[in-house]
Image: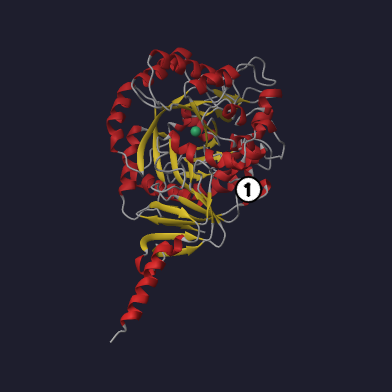
Amino acid sequence: MKNLSSVFLISVLVASLAACQPEDDSVDKISADLILSNGKIVSVDEAFRIFDTIVVTDGKVVELGDASLLEKYDAATVRDLDGKTLMPGFIDSHTHISGDPKRYIDLSEVTSITEIQDLIRAKALELGQGEWITGYGWSEDELAEGRKPLRGDLDVAAPFNPVTLTRAGGHSAVVSTSALGLAEINNNTPDPEGGVIERDENGVANGIIRERQNIVGRLVPESTYDELLASLEINLGDLLAKGITSITDASTAPDEYAMWEELYAKPGVNLPRSAVQFQWFDLEGIEEAKARSGEGSEFLKIGPIKVFADGGFTGPAAFTKEPYLNQGDYRGYLNMPAQDLVDHITEIHDAGWQMGIHAIGDAAIELVVDTLVEALLRNPREDHRTYLNHFSMRPSDETMEKMAEHGIHITQQPNFTYTLEGRYVANLDGWRLEHNNPLRSPMDHGIHVAISSDILPIGPLVGIYAAVTRKGMSGRVFGADEAITIEEAIQGYTIKGAYLGFEEDIKGSLEPGKLADMIVLSDDILTVDSEEIMNIEIEQTYVGGELVYQN
Ligand SMILES: [Zn+2]
């Protein structure tokens, strides 16, 4: 039989304990799905707060705090971060992901023409004579030979296969002699509208076609649906290893969307979240897409309409205010007659769509901004969030002031400063060379600037490195006054990208109620020497609280 006084004493003790530490009761811990603790958790919230522990349930962040959360919560999975840095997954707000045909070779990592030839030889052997071989991603700046591959280089590797290899950036291609023959292009063929068939000093086509490589590419046989679907799953899944948990794909055609929908409906696939941008075709196509845009989910949705204003620097074909360096009075060109561009932008704006507009040269940027301002003044749209992709040349201060005033945003690729250094040095000089891919100046003007990759290359750490160092591949610094801080670069690749997708309330930072899309890094990105940023490894990637990649 219990002693009454001791029962009384115990209840007093329990009552007083409860009063001091209301949550210290192991029996009543709140159950969660996942707890990651003992880390440096970079929340990217408004105050850029750092936490020790994060609690996740049903794919969403429940609470962040110090280690005492371990006493408040219990979870099926509790992991010790061992002091490692955890941050929101990268949001790549301008990239290009698609399924690859069997005839495709990836050239993004090649470092010599010899290596390109080896890949062509292997593919020709796999496919057999007469089959087209395609590829993407070479850049003469990264080739040991220090020059572009030419048709003779391709002919040696595969004399009996037509070959077309697109340069990184997508603005030119090298094609083999057999491919030129099938396209009925000879030395006398005039340049196609908006493009250039490059010729050597004797007027002989050297195999390089700028901007209009589709005059050859259109002959490549179509791939099967299943072939592309399987490849799309692999290519999207590979992004998780780069720490990318959300993308905006900038080049999907409306009729390709069904493949994305099928893939995302597949059970058990590990994929980043995607928004796809349809390229502008016609108003009818846009209205059709609009009718479907409500079908999206947190995993897949239709993004803004893509419009191409001008070319790129790999041609070069970006539309500039002043002539290119040492190229006479050549200033690049718009992708279509100026009035057509103005009409298209105005039409899409009036139809109520957000746009992501490709504008690289300063003249293209200023024309697009002026067009948007006019459309907005005539037909104001609250929170339109239309943005420019690229913004590679710094326009006038007046243009940046207009952008800030009218909420015209940017998604920019500081990684271009690194990977396209050779192109900029060859085509620009002085002030406009130093201010390529400006970040500090548009941000100081009050413009919202997100950061993205445009797959040049796809890894976000290259862009973050270049954003804080302003360094090209050679180590040369371009316009140090355009550098931003590591915190700003991280915001550009996370919360600011979410904002362009109208998703800043559900992702882009780690805060209670938001999706638990997050990555664990091998080093502390906030304090590591800037020269080491590109060497940071992605150790784990979580999408919606699920571990989808483990190094
Ligand atoms: Zn792009």
Residue appearing at x 48%, y 40% in the figure? 495
Q: How many marks?
A: 1
The colouring scheme, among rainbow, by chain, secondary structure or one colour, is: secondary structure
Q: Residue 75 versus residue 274: which sits nearer the camera?
A: 75
Q: Considering depth in this image, is 182 or 19 the residue closer to the camera? A: 19
- The quadrant holding residue 203 is top right
Q: Residues within 10 Å of mark 1 (few under 14, many from 20)?
A: many
Above or below 457: residue 478: above
Image x and y of residue 455, in percent: 52, 40
What residue lies at 28% left-to-right and 28% top-to-bottom? 288
Q: Position of residue 551 (x, y in %)?
A: 52, 59
Q: Spot the residue most to the bottom.
A: 1
Where does label 1 land, which residue? Answer: 533
Q: Does residue 59 appear left or right of residue 414 in this picture?
A: left
Residue 152's place in the image compared with 56, above or below, is above
Is residue 327 visible in the rendered image? The answer is yes
Q: Position of residue 346 (x, y in %)?
A: 40, 17
Q: Residue at x 40, y 67 (%)?
A: 16
Residue 193 seen in render = no
Query: Residue 133 placed where, x, y %?
Result: 48, 41
Q: Amino acid at mark 1?
A: Ile
Q: Is residue 297 left or right of residue 397?
A: left
- Circle 1: element type: helix
